[in-house]
């Protein structure tokens, strides 16, 4: 091996050769394009949340129907993401990227020009197909190109995409809707998406080696019913979906759980011959499993809080949609600003110095939010959200890096698909859990004769209490996650 290798030569001793420089420049370009593209597509997952009232008026539809613009997006993501493990093995980087951004761009154009609600839903499904492919593509590419010693820094940038984009989506849409029609949320995104598509098609090289991966149709069907039923069932229970007329509200959830169990059994059978659609041997790594558990709890806290705080600020404190969006913006910006620093700390010191205080901060904020009242000052809510964002920022980057870094390169694409799937399911579960507890408690109190605003406040406190209790699990697990490079030499990562 050449002593001039960039990965082995100490800084300041031998200048990297021309090939090292070329590869480093290429890798930075590839990851940069993927990061920008992923931010654009992930942002659209929550950008419609505050547009529903205007959408209802413009298209003359009820609230239950309007909610489908978000539900359909989440549902499609949950169905498509598990399949990306196969796609990333079977096809090369450039065609997968072009497919993802083409889906997203076409969906965005259809949404901007949609003559009615049905076309808008179809457009959101097409958008979500591109979004579902992009996130695992980004993660798998980073794990392939970036050496372990500097992955934390790069994963810090990925955590900006996964955590900050959904957090600031409502703020951006609130600002746009304060001056423009809802269609402009798509018109303003479209040229950026098209430029990213063209730039990627011209500049992204193929950086992975495809292999002939088998495609199991039964696995795809079980995956669609399993993950789709799970997310739709949780969304319906949380008030975001429309129950099927002949089926109880918990019906889709039961169907999803049964299909998911059959899907898992099918994958365990197929992976013996390396034919699994989603290889569950990722969970043979203890470190990966612990990281995923913490990640799931963190996403539940993030999405649960994102749905509950706007309800509290608007229905209890009487703030406008725009004011609510602006109050949530600082937390999202803080999360984004901290991510690169957190990545550098991870590279030098490992995960525990970040995960332990991060999980404690998140838990402490959720316990604090159990004490909100109808007279709580707005500035206290703002500070609570910023501090919560700091805690989550300390957690996301170490969890991404430690989880995927604990896997063999052959399992990177499957691990990325698992992370993306867990994000969707945990986000839906957090939303459903918080909203269901809030609504149930508030309904009980209103029935008993309490003031509706005070009842809803009490319901919100109850929801945060359950979230706070769950967060204690993340505090315990935070002490167990290890940096893969710290494992004994010769031992499989994560064991």
Image: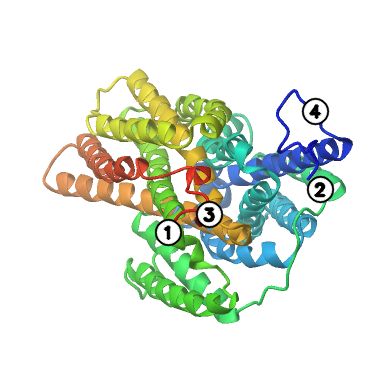
Give the Cα separation between the discs numbered 2 and 3: 35 Å
Q: Name the residue under label 2.
A: 204
Identified at 58% across, 58% down, the residue is 408
Identified at 41% across, 45% down, the residue is 481
Give the Cα separation between the discs numbered 1 and 4: 60 Å
In terms of depth relative to the viewer, which is nearer, 405 or 154? 405
267 displayed left or right of 31: left
Query: In the image, which is nearer the foreground, mark 1 or mark 4?
Result: 4
Query: In the image, which is nearer the foreground, mark 1 or mark 3?
Result: 3
Q: Quadrant of the N terminus?
A: top right
Q: What element carries label 2?
A: loop
Give the Cα separation between the discs numbered 4 and 2: 29 Å
Q: Is mark 1 on a helix, strand or loop?
A: loop
Give the Cα separation between the discs numbered 2 and 1: 38 Å
Q: Please say whether residue 183 is visible from this viewpoint.
A: no
Q: Is mark 4 on a helix, strand or loop?
A: loop
| Mark sitting on residue 241 | 1
| Mark sitting on residue 490 | 3
Q: Name the residue under label 4.
A: 14
Classify residue 301 by image quadrant.
top left
Identified at 42% across, 41% down, the residue is 302
Q: How crowded is mark 4: few (under 14 residues within 10 Å), some or many (20 or more)?
A: few
């Amino acid at each position: 091996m050449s002593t001039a290798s960039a990965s082995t030569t100490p800084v300041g001793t031998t200048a990297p050769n021309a090939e090292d420089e070329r590869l480093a420049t290429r890798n930075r370009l590839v990851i940069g394009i993927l990061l920008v593209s992923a931010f654009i597509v992930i942002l659209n997952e929550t950008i419609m949340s505050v547009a529903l009232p205007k959408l209802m008026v413009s298209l003359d539809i009820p609230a239950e129907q309007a909610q489908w613009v978000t539900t359909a997006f989440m549902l499609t993501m949950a169905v498509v993401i598990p399949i990306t493990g196969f796609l990333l093995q079977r096809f090369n980087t450039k065609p997968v990227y072009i497919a993802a951004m083409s889906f997203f761009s076409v969906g965005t154009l259809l949404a901007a020009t949609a003559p009615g609600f049905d076309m808008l839903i179809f457009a959101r499904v097409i958008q979500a197909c591109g979004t579902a492919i992009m996130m695992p593509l980004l993660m798998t590419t980073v794990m392939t190109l970036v050496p372990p010693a500097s992955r934390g820094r790069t994963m810090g940038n990925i955590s900006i995409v996964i955590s900050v984009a959904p957090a600031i989506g409502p703020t951006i849409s609130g600002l746009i809707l304060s001056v423009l029609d809802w269609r402009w949320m798509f018109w303003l995104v479209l040229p950026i998406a098209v430029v990213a598509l063209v730039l990627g098609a011209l500049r992204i090289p193929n950086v992975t080696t495809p292999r002939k991966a088998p495609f199991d149709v039964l696995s795809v069907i079980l995956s669609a019913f399993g993950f789709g039923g799970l997310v739709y069932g949780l969304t319906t229970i949380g008030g975001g979906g429309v129950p099927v007329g002949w089926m109880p509200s918990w019906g889709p959830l039961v169907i999803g759980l049964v299909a998911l169990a059959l899907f898992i059994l099918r994958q365990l059978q197929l992976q013996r011959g390396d034919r699994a659609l989603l290889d569950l041997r990722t969970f043979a790594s203890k470190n990966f499993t612990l990281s995923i558990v913490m990640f799931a709890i963190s996403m539940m806290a993030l999405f649960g809080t994102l749905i509950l705080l706007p309800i509290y600020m608007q229905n209890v404190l009487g703030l406008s949609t725009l004011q609510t969006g602006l109050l949530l913006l600082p937390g999202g910006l803080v999360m984004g600003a901290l991510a690169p620093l957190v990545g550098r700390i991870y590279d030098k010191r490992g995960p525990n110095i970040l995960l332990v205080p991060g999980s404690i901060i998140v838990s402490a904020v959720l316990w604090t939010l159990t004490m909100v009242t109808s007279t709580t000052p707005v500035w206290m809510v703002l500070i609570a959200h910023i501090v919560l964002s700091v805690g989550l920022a300390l957690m996301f980057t170490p969890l991404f890096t430690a989880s995927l870094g604990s896997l063999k390169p052959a399992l990177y694409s499957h691990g990325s698909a698992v992370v993306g799937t867990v994000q969707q399911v945990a986000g839906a579960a957090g939303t459903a859990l918080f909203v269901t507890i809030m609504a149930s408690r508030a309904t009980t109190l209103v029935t008993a004769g309490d003031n509706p605003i005070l009842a809803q406040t009490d319901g919100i406190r109850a929801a945060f209490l359950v979230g706070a209790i769950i967060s204690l699990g993340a505090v315990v697990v935070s002490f167990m996650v290890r940096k893969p490079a710290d494992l004994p030499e010769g031992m499989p990562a994560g064991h």
